């Protein structure tokens, strides 16, 4: 080696060492799927050849952040900063903009998604004899989305040689719901505190707000509800509206509109009125004035999300008015400004009904057609409450004259909190593809809704979501809200490539693990249609024996109904007849113990312990088998990670390994506690070959977790 | 430029670019004062010449982390990894160890701090004809402390040519107190949640625990109380002890012993006993068994910190026993294992006394000599409660037969939370140097105490302490706990150099700003000896008018006693006579309105509005002048930062600028609200030339902050 070359190498190592050494935790998950780490060869050279200059003269805030993100991404991925050019002057030109921002595009024959659609196109073409790539849209935000898509092509090592892409989001509303309280606690949050630092707002803008906006915009999420549905009137005080406005200012360039939740009694609690009756003129006026005040501060304010007359929240029924009366009053207040009201269908009265799962349908179905045009009804994916598996909500398809937004949980309230690996892309896909038969076969849930709302799993934890893999659920939610026909597996594959590595073996094995993971949780917690066996209140761990507390229909025994004969909730015609809330073909299938898919068996039927399952086993044996299988899958997941995790940087690898170990321990706890308990009813032995529970029932009953998070 | 050189430069830039680009926030404050950024020339070359190999063969966990820290530091600072050598074989050898770990050291004539002292020496010498530097100690942890000291020499650009250093800590107990609850909330915490993730412990060890240990060890802090003094018996349950043991395992190599707080009623609450009477045999036995259980899990467990019979906490007085009875019972339980009990003197009964400031002295002074040898009494720096300024606590020097630990707040409960820049090194120094006259002149507080305890300002915020500058308070606390004679200014200078830059102008101007900062807070909040004018409960902002709540001696009006005649709490012989609790020379000075230092004037005297101050102004005019001056200093601090902040990376610079802006706004709020309110008593005009308050009093009274943090 020549002296000069040796010096050169030393300098290289020196610079690399300096840059790397002092960084405490460069790979801790903070960068999410926007890591922009260097692309290996030959892809690096290919991309550097394909992209050599950028033509992007637009000057709106959104076009500016699109340009900045592009350069940031390419600097990380390719180590280059593209030269800005006024026009295409060489091969490898990247032309970015709208017809308004770039007259060049206006002059071309370009088929683009319609204005207002937020879609975009990415096309390989030739301009003035030069090879070029166009990222174009009618809306500025479409350009931003297109830039993120382009970067994703590089992040996942797609060829840029002949790109011909056109994307339009399926849903107009792609919304995050933050169940974040003003004291920074997060209801059902397992990732630290709320990222909204209300106390320091509006004066201090945490740089994290910008990274939050970038992450969401990269998925096409275009709305965020800042506050908890269990709401607080203080969030509508003038000082808090200024804080919300400061956040809206950060999010606006990224195409994200801010919503707030409404405390229905706010006119009393902060308005000094004697009533919150939606028919009262002073109440209407108060809300109109409040809406005007908000829109002065936040001109593109999205509107209100409302949980009313549910779980103790005030609402219109307190005054003998209907949900429609309440929603319409608020809708009228925001209508002049283009706002909407999202009214939650997750309601149940304080009187206990025959079947809690029936209540939303009973309450809202009769109101179809009674809502203003700017009211959307937000319906949870299932009729109960974000269980590991639920059949789709019977309201989907049942309210043809009311736009519905489906609410799913991204946070894992019932799926093991932050430490259990449970990829929810499969859960979302399952319900989006479920056929309601509302307008005949093929009327999938995806086709009868107009929006997707996800209860965020975002907090101040360095990795945002409490675990590395929980980031995948935020990611999958966003991608499916854009395109509900996309495959959870493809989305998972993109996420793994962007988040960890493009190594083919790693991608294949980790995606396989993710695809099995949610079913594993179902199996070790609530197999065969069982539901809500979680501990009271915080929902951490199993408590199938719990029968106390505030109301019976919040208890596991209400839901599993185990007795000496069998187990399961009879919702067929012989029971609560909840099946009748579905379209006839669905009702017929779910209501028939022979036809119902086994994953919903105990959701809809009370089944004898000796009932013969498809496997040939008795129900009891099958139950124990499923519980056992769930644990085994987690054990395999740990093994997989032990084998492939070495491809991941130390901090993330070790965290994932530690969490998988916790998951295995807790999966076993779930299995053993539930089996031991249900055995007191079945009085049947553990099938031979399967391990007996580790402890007697009293051991599991004695465990207590007074400080489980998220509650 | 030759082609090869050009390529070389390109590669360098490429590598530098790659390494730098994807890191989201390399400089966000996480690295604290252990940033280890590259040393500029000529210092870089000097240090690389001075340090060329390392001889450190010890294999204890503590020696291993010392070695790892050394290499980490040098890699960052100098871009080198020192070659490990079995013996000194060239110039620039660094010899690290104890006489036990390195026989070479045992053979040398080396004067070292005594075994058990935790001290160390760093010496330049010659070994076998080679230039060498020795970092040696009798205790392993002394070696670790010495390595951090050596790295500090590099970080602050000190010459290594002729080092001759010997350090022994002044106090045996250098303790952090975490007021952290098991639900991760932190009482009086302004930096996010507790870093202790109890829910995931003991299975998941957050890498942050290690960085916490490194930071504390770098200061010589050797103990940490994990749990809040307002304690929870659950922390003594077996499952929680396992969690504490997992933390103890992480902290042990860094010389940090774990303590827990004690809920005095634990034998009832988790032990199933009917009483917690310290004279009850079953109670004694329960604590003995509990201590044995803890020491099985944590062999080096430090002991218990106890807040009893104070602010509603249970204690021995519930059973007619004294504080000594309670403390001794616990002390007997931990004595066989070498543990200690730290008993807090911050007690006051539920009956309101004539002067709350007198109560700790009245309660504890008669108990001097009644405590077991392994009981320490933990006394707050002042008699009230961590005010911006208090005279030293009269118990210091008053209990010659009882070892006292002084408790100071690092968190800024009463000094503006996280956003106000208030360097507390000056506060600690002021009280450490205060003369108690207990054993004649020169009996400073530092000389009559045996330990320093600091209520931590540490949380999950990325910057650990809520703001960049609040890190300086953690740092200064640790350095003064090691050497209470050190100067707050010198310590501040080291901190600025290590945290930001060694640029001389920057260091001088920022240290100057820090040195003035705490006095500025005193001036704009509570000048001239005023105290506790903070809002009720959360203590955020001014509320001098508040007179409601649970008890009178928690209200501002109790403390300021403003009326038409004047203002101030008469603690002289004509009033509560609290001055009599001090040694005679101090009592004579404080008790005499003519002799008392003006900064304590209104602490000890009720003074007429027209009283002539040293400045020649009336008390009222002086008061307004001081309030105004406090605001002006903050304005100057902002100006300073605008001028020199460009030397600091963007994220930290901008956060500091935003916080200083908040501080100025809130300083003005404090001034205006207090002046407007006190003016209703003085009925005197604002001195000419000083700005009138911005709003009428009602405006300030109407402000409310229901979600102020830390409460």
Image (cartoon, coloured by chain):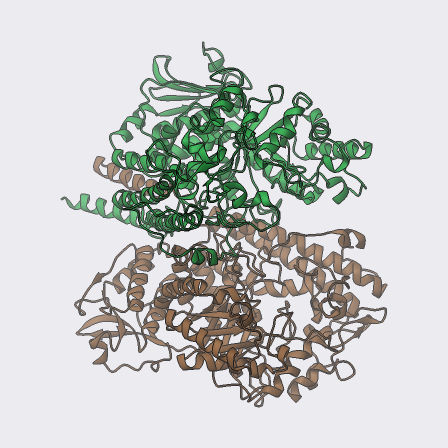
Chain colours: A brown, B green
Q: Is residue A250 above or below residue B147?
A: below
**Residue A545 falls in which quadrant of the image?**
bottom right
Residue at image point 49% right, 65% down: A235
Left or right of A421: which side holds A702? Answer: right
Q: Is residue B335 above or below residue B282?
A: above
- What is the x, y in percent for residue B222? 54, 29
Q: Is residue A83 visible?
A: yes
- What is the x, y in percent for residue A319? 62, 79
Instruction: Between residue A495 and residue A97, name the one nearer to us.
Output: A97
- What is the x, y in percent for residue B63? 50, 27
Left or right of A111: which side holds A270? Answer: right
Instruction: Between residue A461 and residue A327, name the one nearer to us.
Output: A327
Q: Is residue B415 above or below residue A125?
A: above
Question: Which residue extends farthest left?
Answer: B1
Instruction: Between residue A78 and residue A185, name the one nearer to us.
Output: A185
- What is the x, y in percent for residue B466? 45, 46
Identify the image quadrant of the N terminus of chain B: top left
**Residue A147 falls in which quadrant of the image?**
bottom left
Q: Is residue B300 visible?
A: no
**Residue B367 falls in which quadrant of the image?**
top right
Left or right of B158: which side holds A130? Answer: left
Q: How many dots with numbers?
A: 0
Instruction: Between residue B480 and residue A385, name the one nearer to us.
Output: B480
């Amino acid at each position: 080696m020549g002296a000069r070359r040796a010096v050169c190498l030393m300098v290289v190592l020196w610079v690399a060492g300096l840059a790397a050494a002092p960084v405490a935790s460069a790979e801790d998950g903070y960068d999410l799927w926007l890591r922009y780490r260097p692309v290996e060869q030959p892809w690096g050279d290919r991309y550097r050849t394909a992209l050599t200059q950028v033509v992007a003269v637009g000057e709106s805030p959104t076009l500016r952040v699109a340009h900045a993100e592009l350069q940031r991404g390419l600097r990380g991925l390719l180590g280059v900063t593209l030269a800005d050019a006024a026009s295409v002057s060489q091969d490898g030109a990247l032309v970015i903009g709208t017809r308004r921002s770039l007259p060049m595009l206006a002059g071309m024959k370009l088929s683009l998604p319609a204005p207002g659609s937020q879609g975009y196109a990415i096309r390989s073409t030739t301009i003035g004899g030069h090879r070029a790539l166009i990222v174009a849209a009618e809306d500025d935000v479409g350009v931003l989305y297109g830039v993120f898509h382009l970067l994703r092509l590089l992040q996942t090592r797609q060829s840029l040689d002949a790109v011909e892409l056109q994307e339009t989001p399926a849903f107009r509303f792609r919304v995050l719901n933050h169940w974040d309280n003003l004291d920074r606690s997060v209801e059902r949050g397992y990732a630290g505190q709320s990222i909204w630092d209300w106390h320091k707002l509006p004066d201090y803008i945490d740089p994290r707000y910008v990274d939050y906006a970038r992450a969401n915009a990269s998925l096409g999420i275009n709305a965020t509800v800042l506050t908890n549905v269990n709401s607080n009137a203080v969030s509508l005080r003038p000082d808090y509206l200024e804080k919300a406005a400061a956040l809206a200012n950060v999010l606006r360039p990224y195409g994200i509109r801010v919503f707030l939740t409404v405390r229905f009694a706010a006119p009393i609690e902060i308005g000094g009125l004697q009533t919150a009756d939606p028919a009262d003129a002073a109440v209407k006026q108060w809300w109109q004035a409040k809406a005007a005040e908000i829109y002065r501060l936040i001109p593109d304010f999205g509107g209100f999300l409302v949980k009313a007359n549910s779980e103790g929240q005030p609402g219109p029924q307190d005054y003998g008015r209907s949900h429609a009366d309440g929603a319409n009053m608020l809708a009228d207040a925001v209508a002049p400004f283009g706002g909407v009201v999202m009214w939650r269908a997750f309601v149940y009265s304080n009187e206990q009904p025959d079947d809690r799962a029936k209540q939303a349908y009973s309450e809202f179905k009769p109101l179809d057609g009674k809502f203003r045009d700017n009211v959307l009804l937000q319906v949870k994916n299932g009729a109960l409450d974000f269980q590991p598996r639920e059949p789709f909500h019977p309201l989907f398809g049942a309210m043809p004259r009311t736009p519905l937004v489906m609410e799913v949980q991204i946070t894992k309230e019932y799926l093991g909190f932050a430490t259990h690996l449970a990829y929810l892309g499969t859960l979302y896909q399952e319900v989006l593809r479920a056929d309601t038969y509302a307008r005949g076969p093929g009327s999938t849930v995806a086709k009868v809704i107009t929006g997707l709302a996800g209860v965020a799993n975002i907090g101040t934890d360095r990795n945002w979501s409490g675990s590395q893999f929980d980031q995948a659920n935020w990611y999958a939610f966003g991608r499916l809200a854009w395109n509900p026909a996309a495959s959870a597996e493809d989305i998972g594959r993109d996420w793994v490539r962007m988040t960890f590595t493009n190594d083919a073996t790693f991608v294949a094995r980790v995606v396989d693990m993710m695809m099995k993971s949610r079913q594993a949780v179902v199996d070790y917690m609530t197999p065969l249609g069982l539901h809500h066996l979680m501990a009271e209140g915080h929902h951490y761990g199993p408590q199938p024996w719990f029968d106390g507390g505030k109301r019976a229909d919040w208890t596991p025994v209400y839901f599993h109904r185990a007795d000496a004969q069998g187990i399961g909730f009879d919702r067929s015609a012989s029971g609560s007849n909840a099946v009748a809330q579905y379209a006839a073909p669905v009702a017929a299938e779910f209501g028939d113990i022979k036809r119902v898919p086994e994953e919903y068996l105990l959701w809809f039927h009370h089944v004898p312990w000796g009932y013969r399952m498809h496997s040939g086993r008795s129900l009891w044996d099958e139950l124990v088998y499923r519980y056992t299988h769930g644990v085994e899958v987690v054990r395999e997941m740990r093994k997989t990670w032990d084998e492939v995790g070495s491809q991941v940087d130390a901090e993330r690898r070790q965290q994932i390994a530690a969490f998988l170990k916790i998951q295995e321990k807790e999966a076993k706890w779930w299995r053993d506690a539930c089996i031991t308990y249900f055995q007191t009813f079945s009085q049947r032995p553990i099938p031979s070959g399967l391990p007996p529970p580790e402890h007697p029932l009293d051991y599991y009953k004695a465990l207590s977790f007074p400080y489980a998070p998220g509650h």
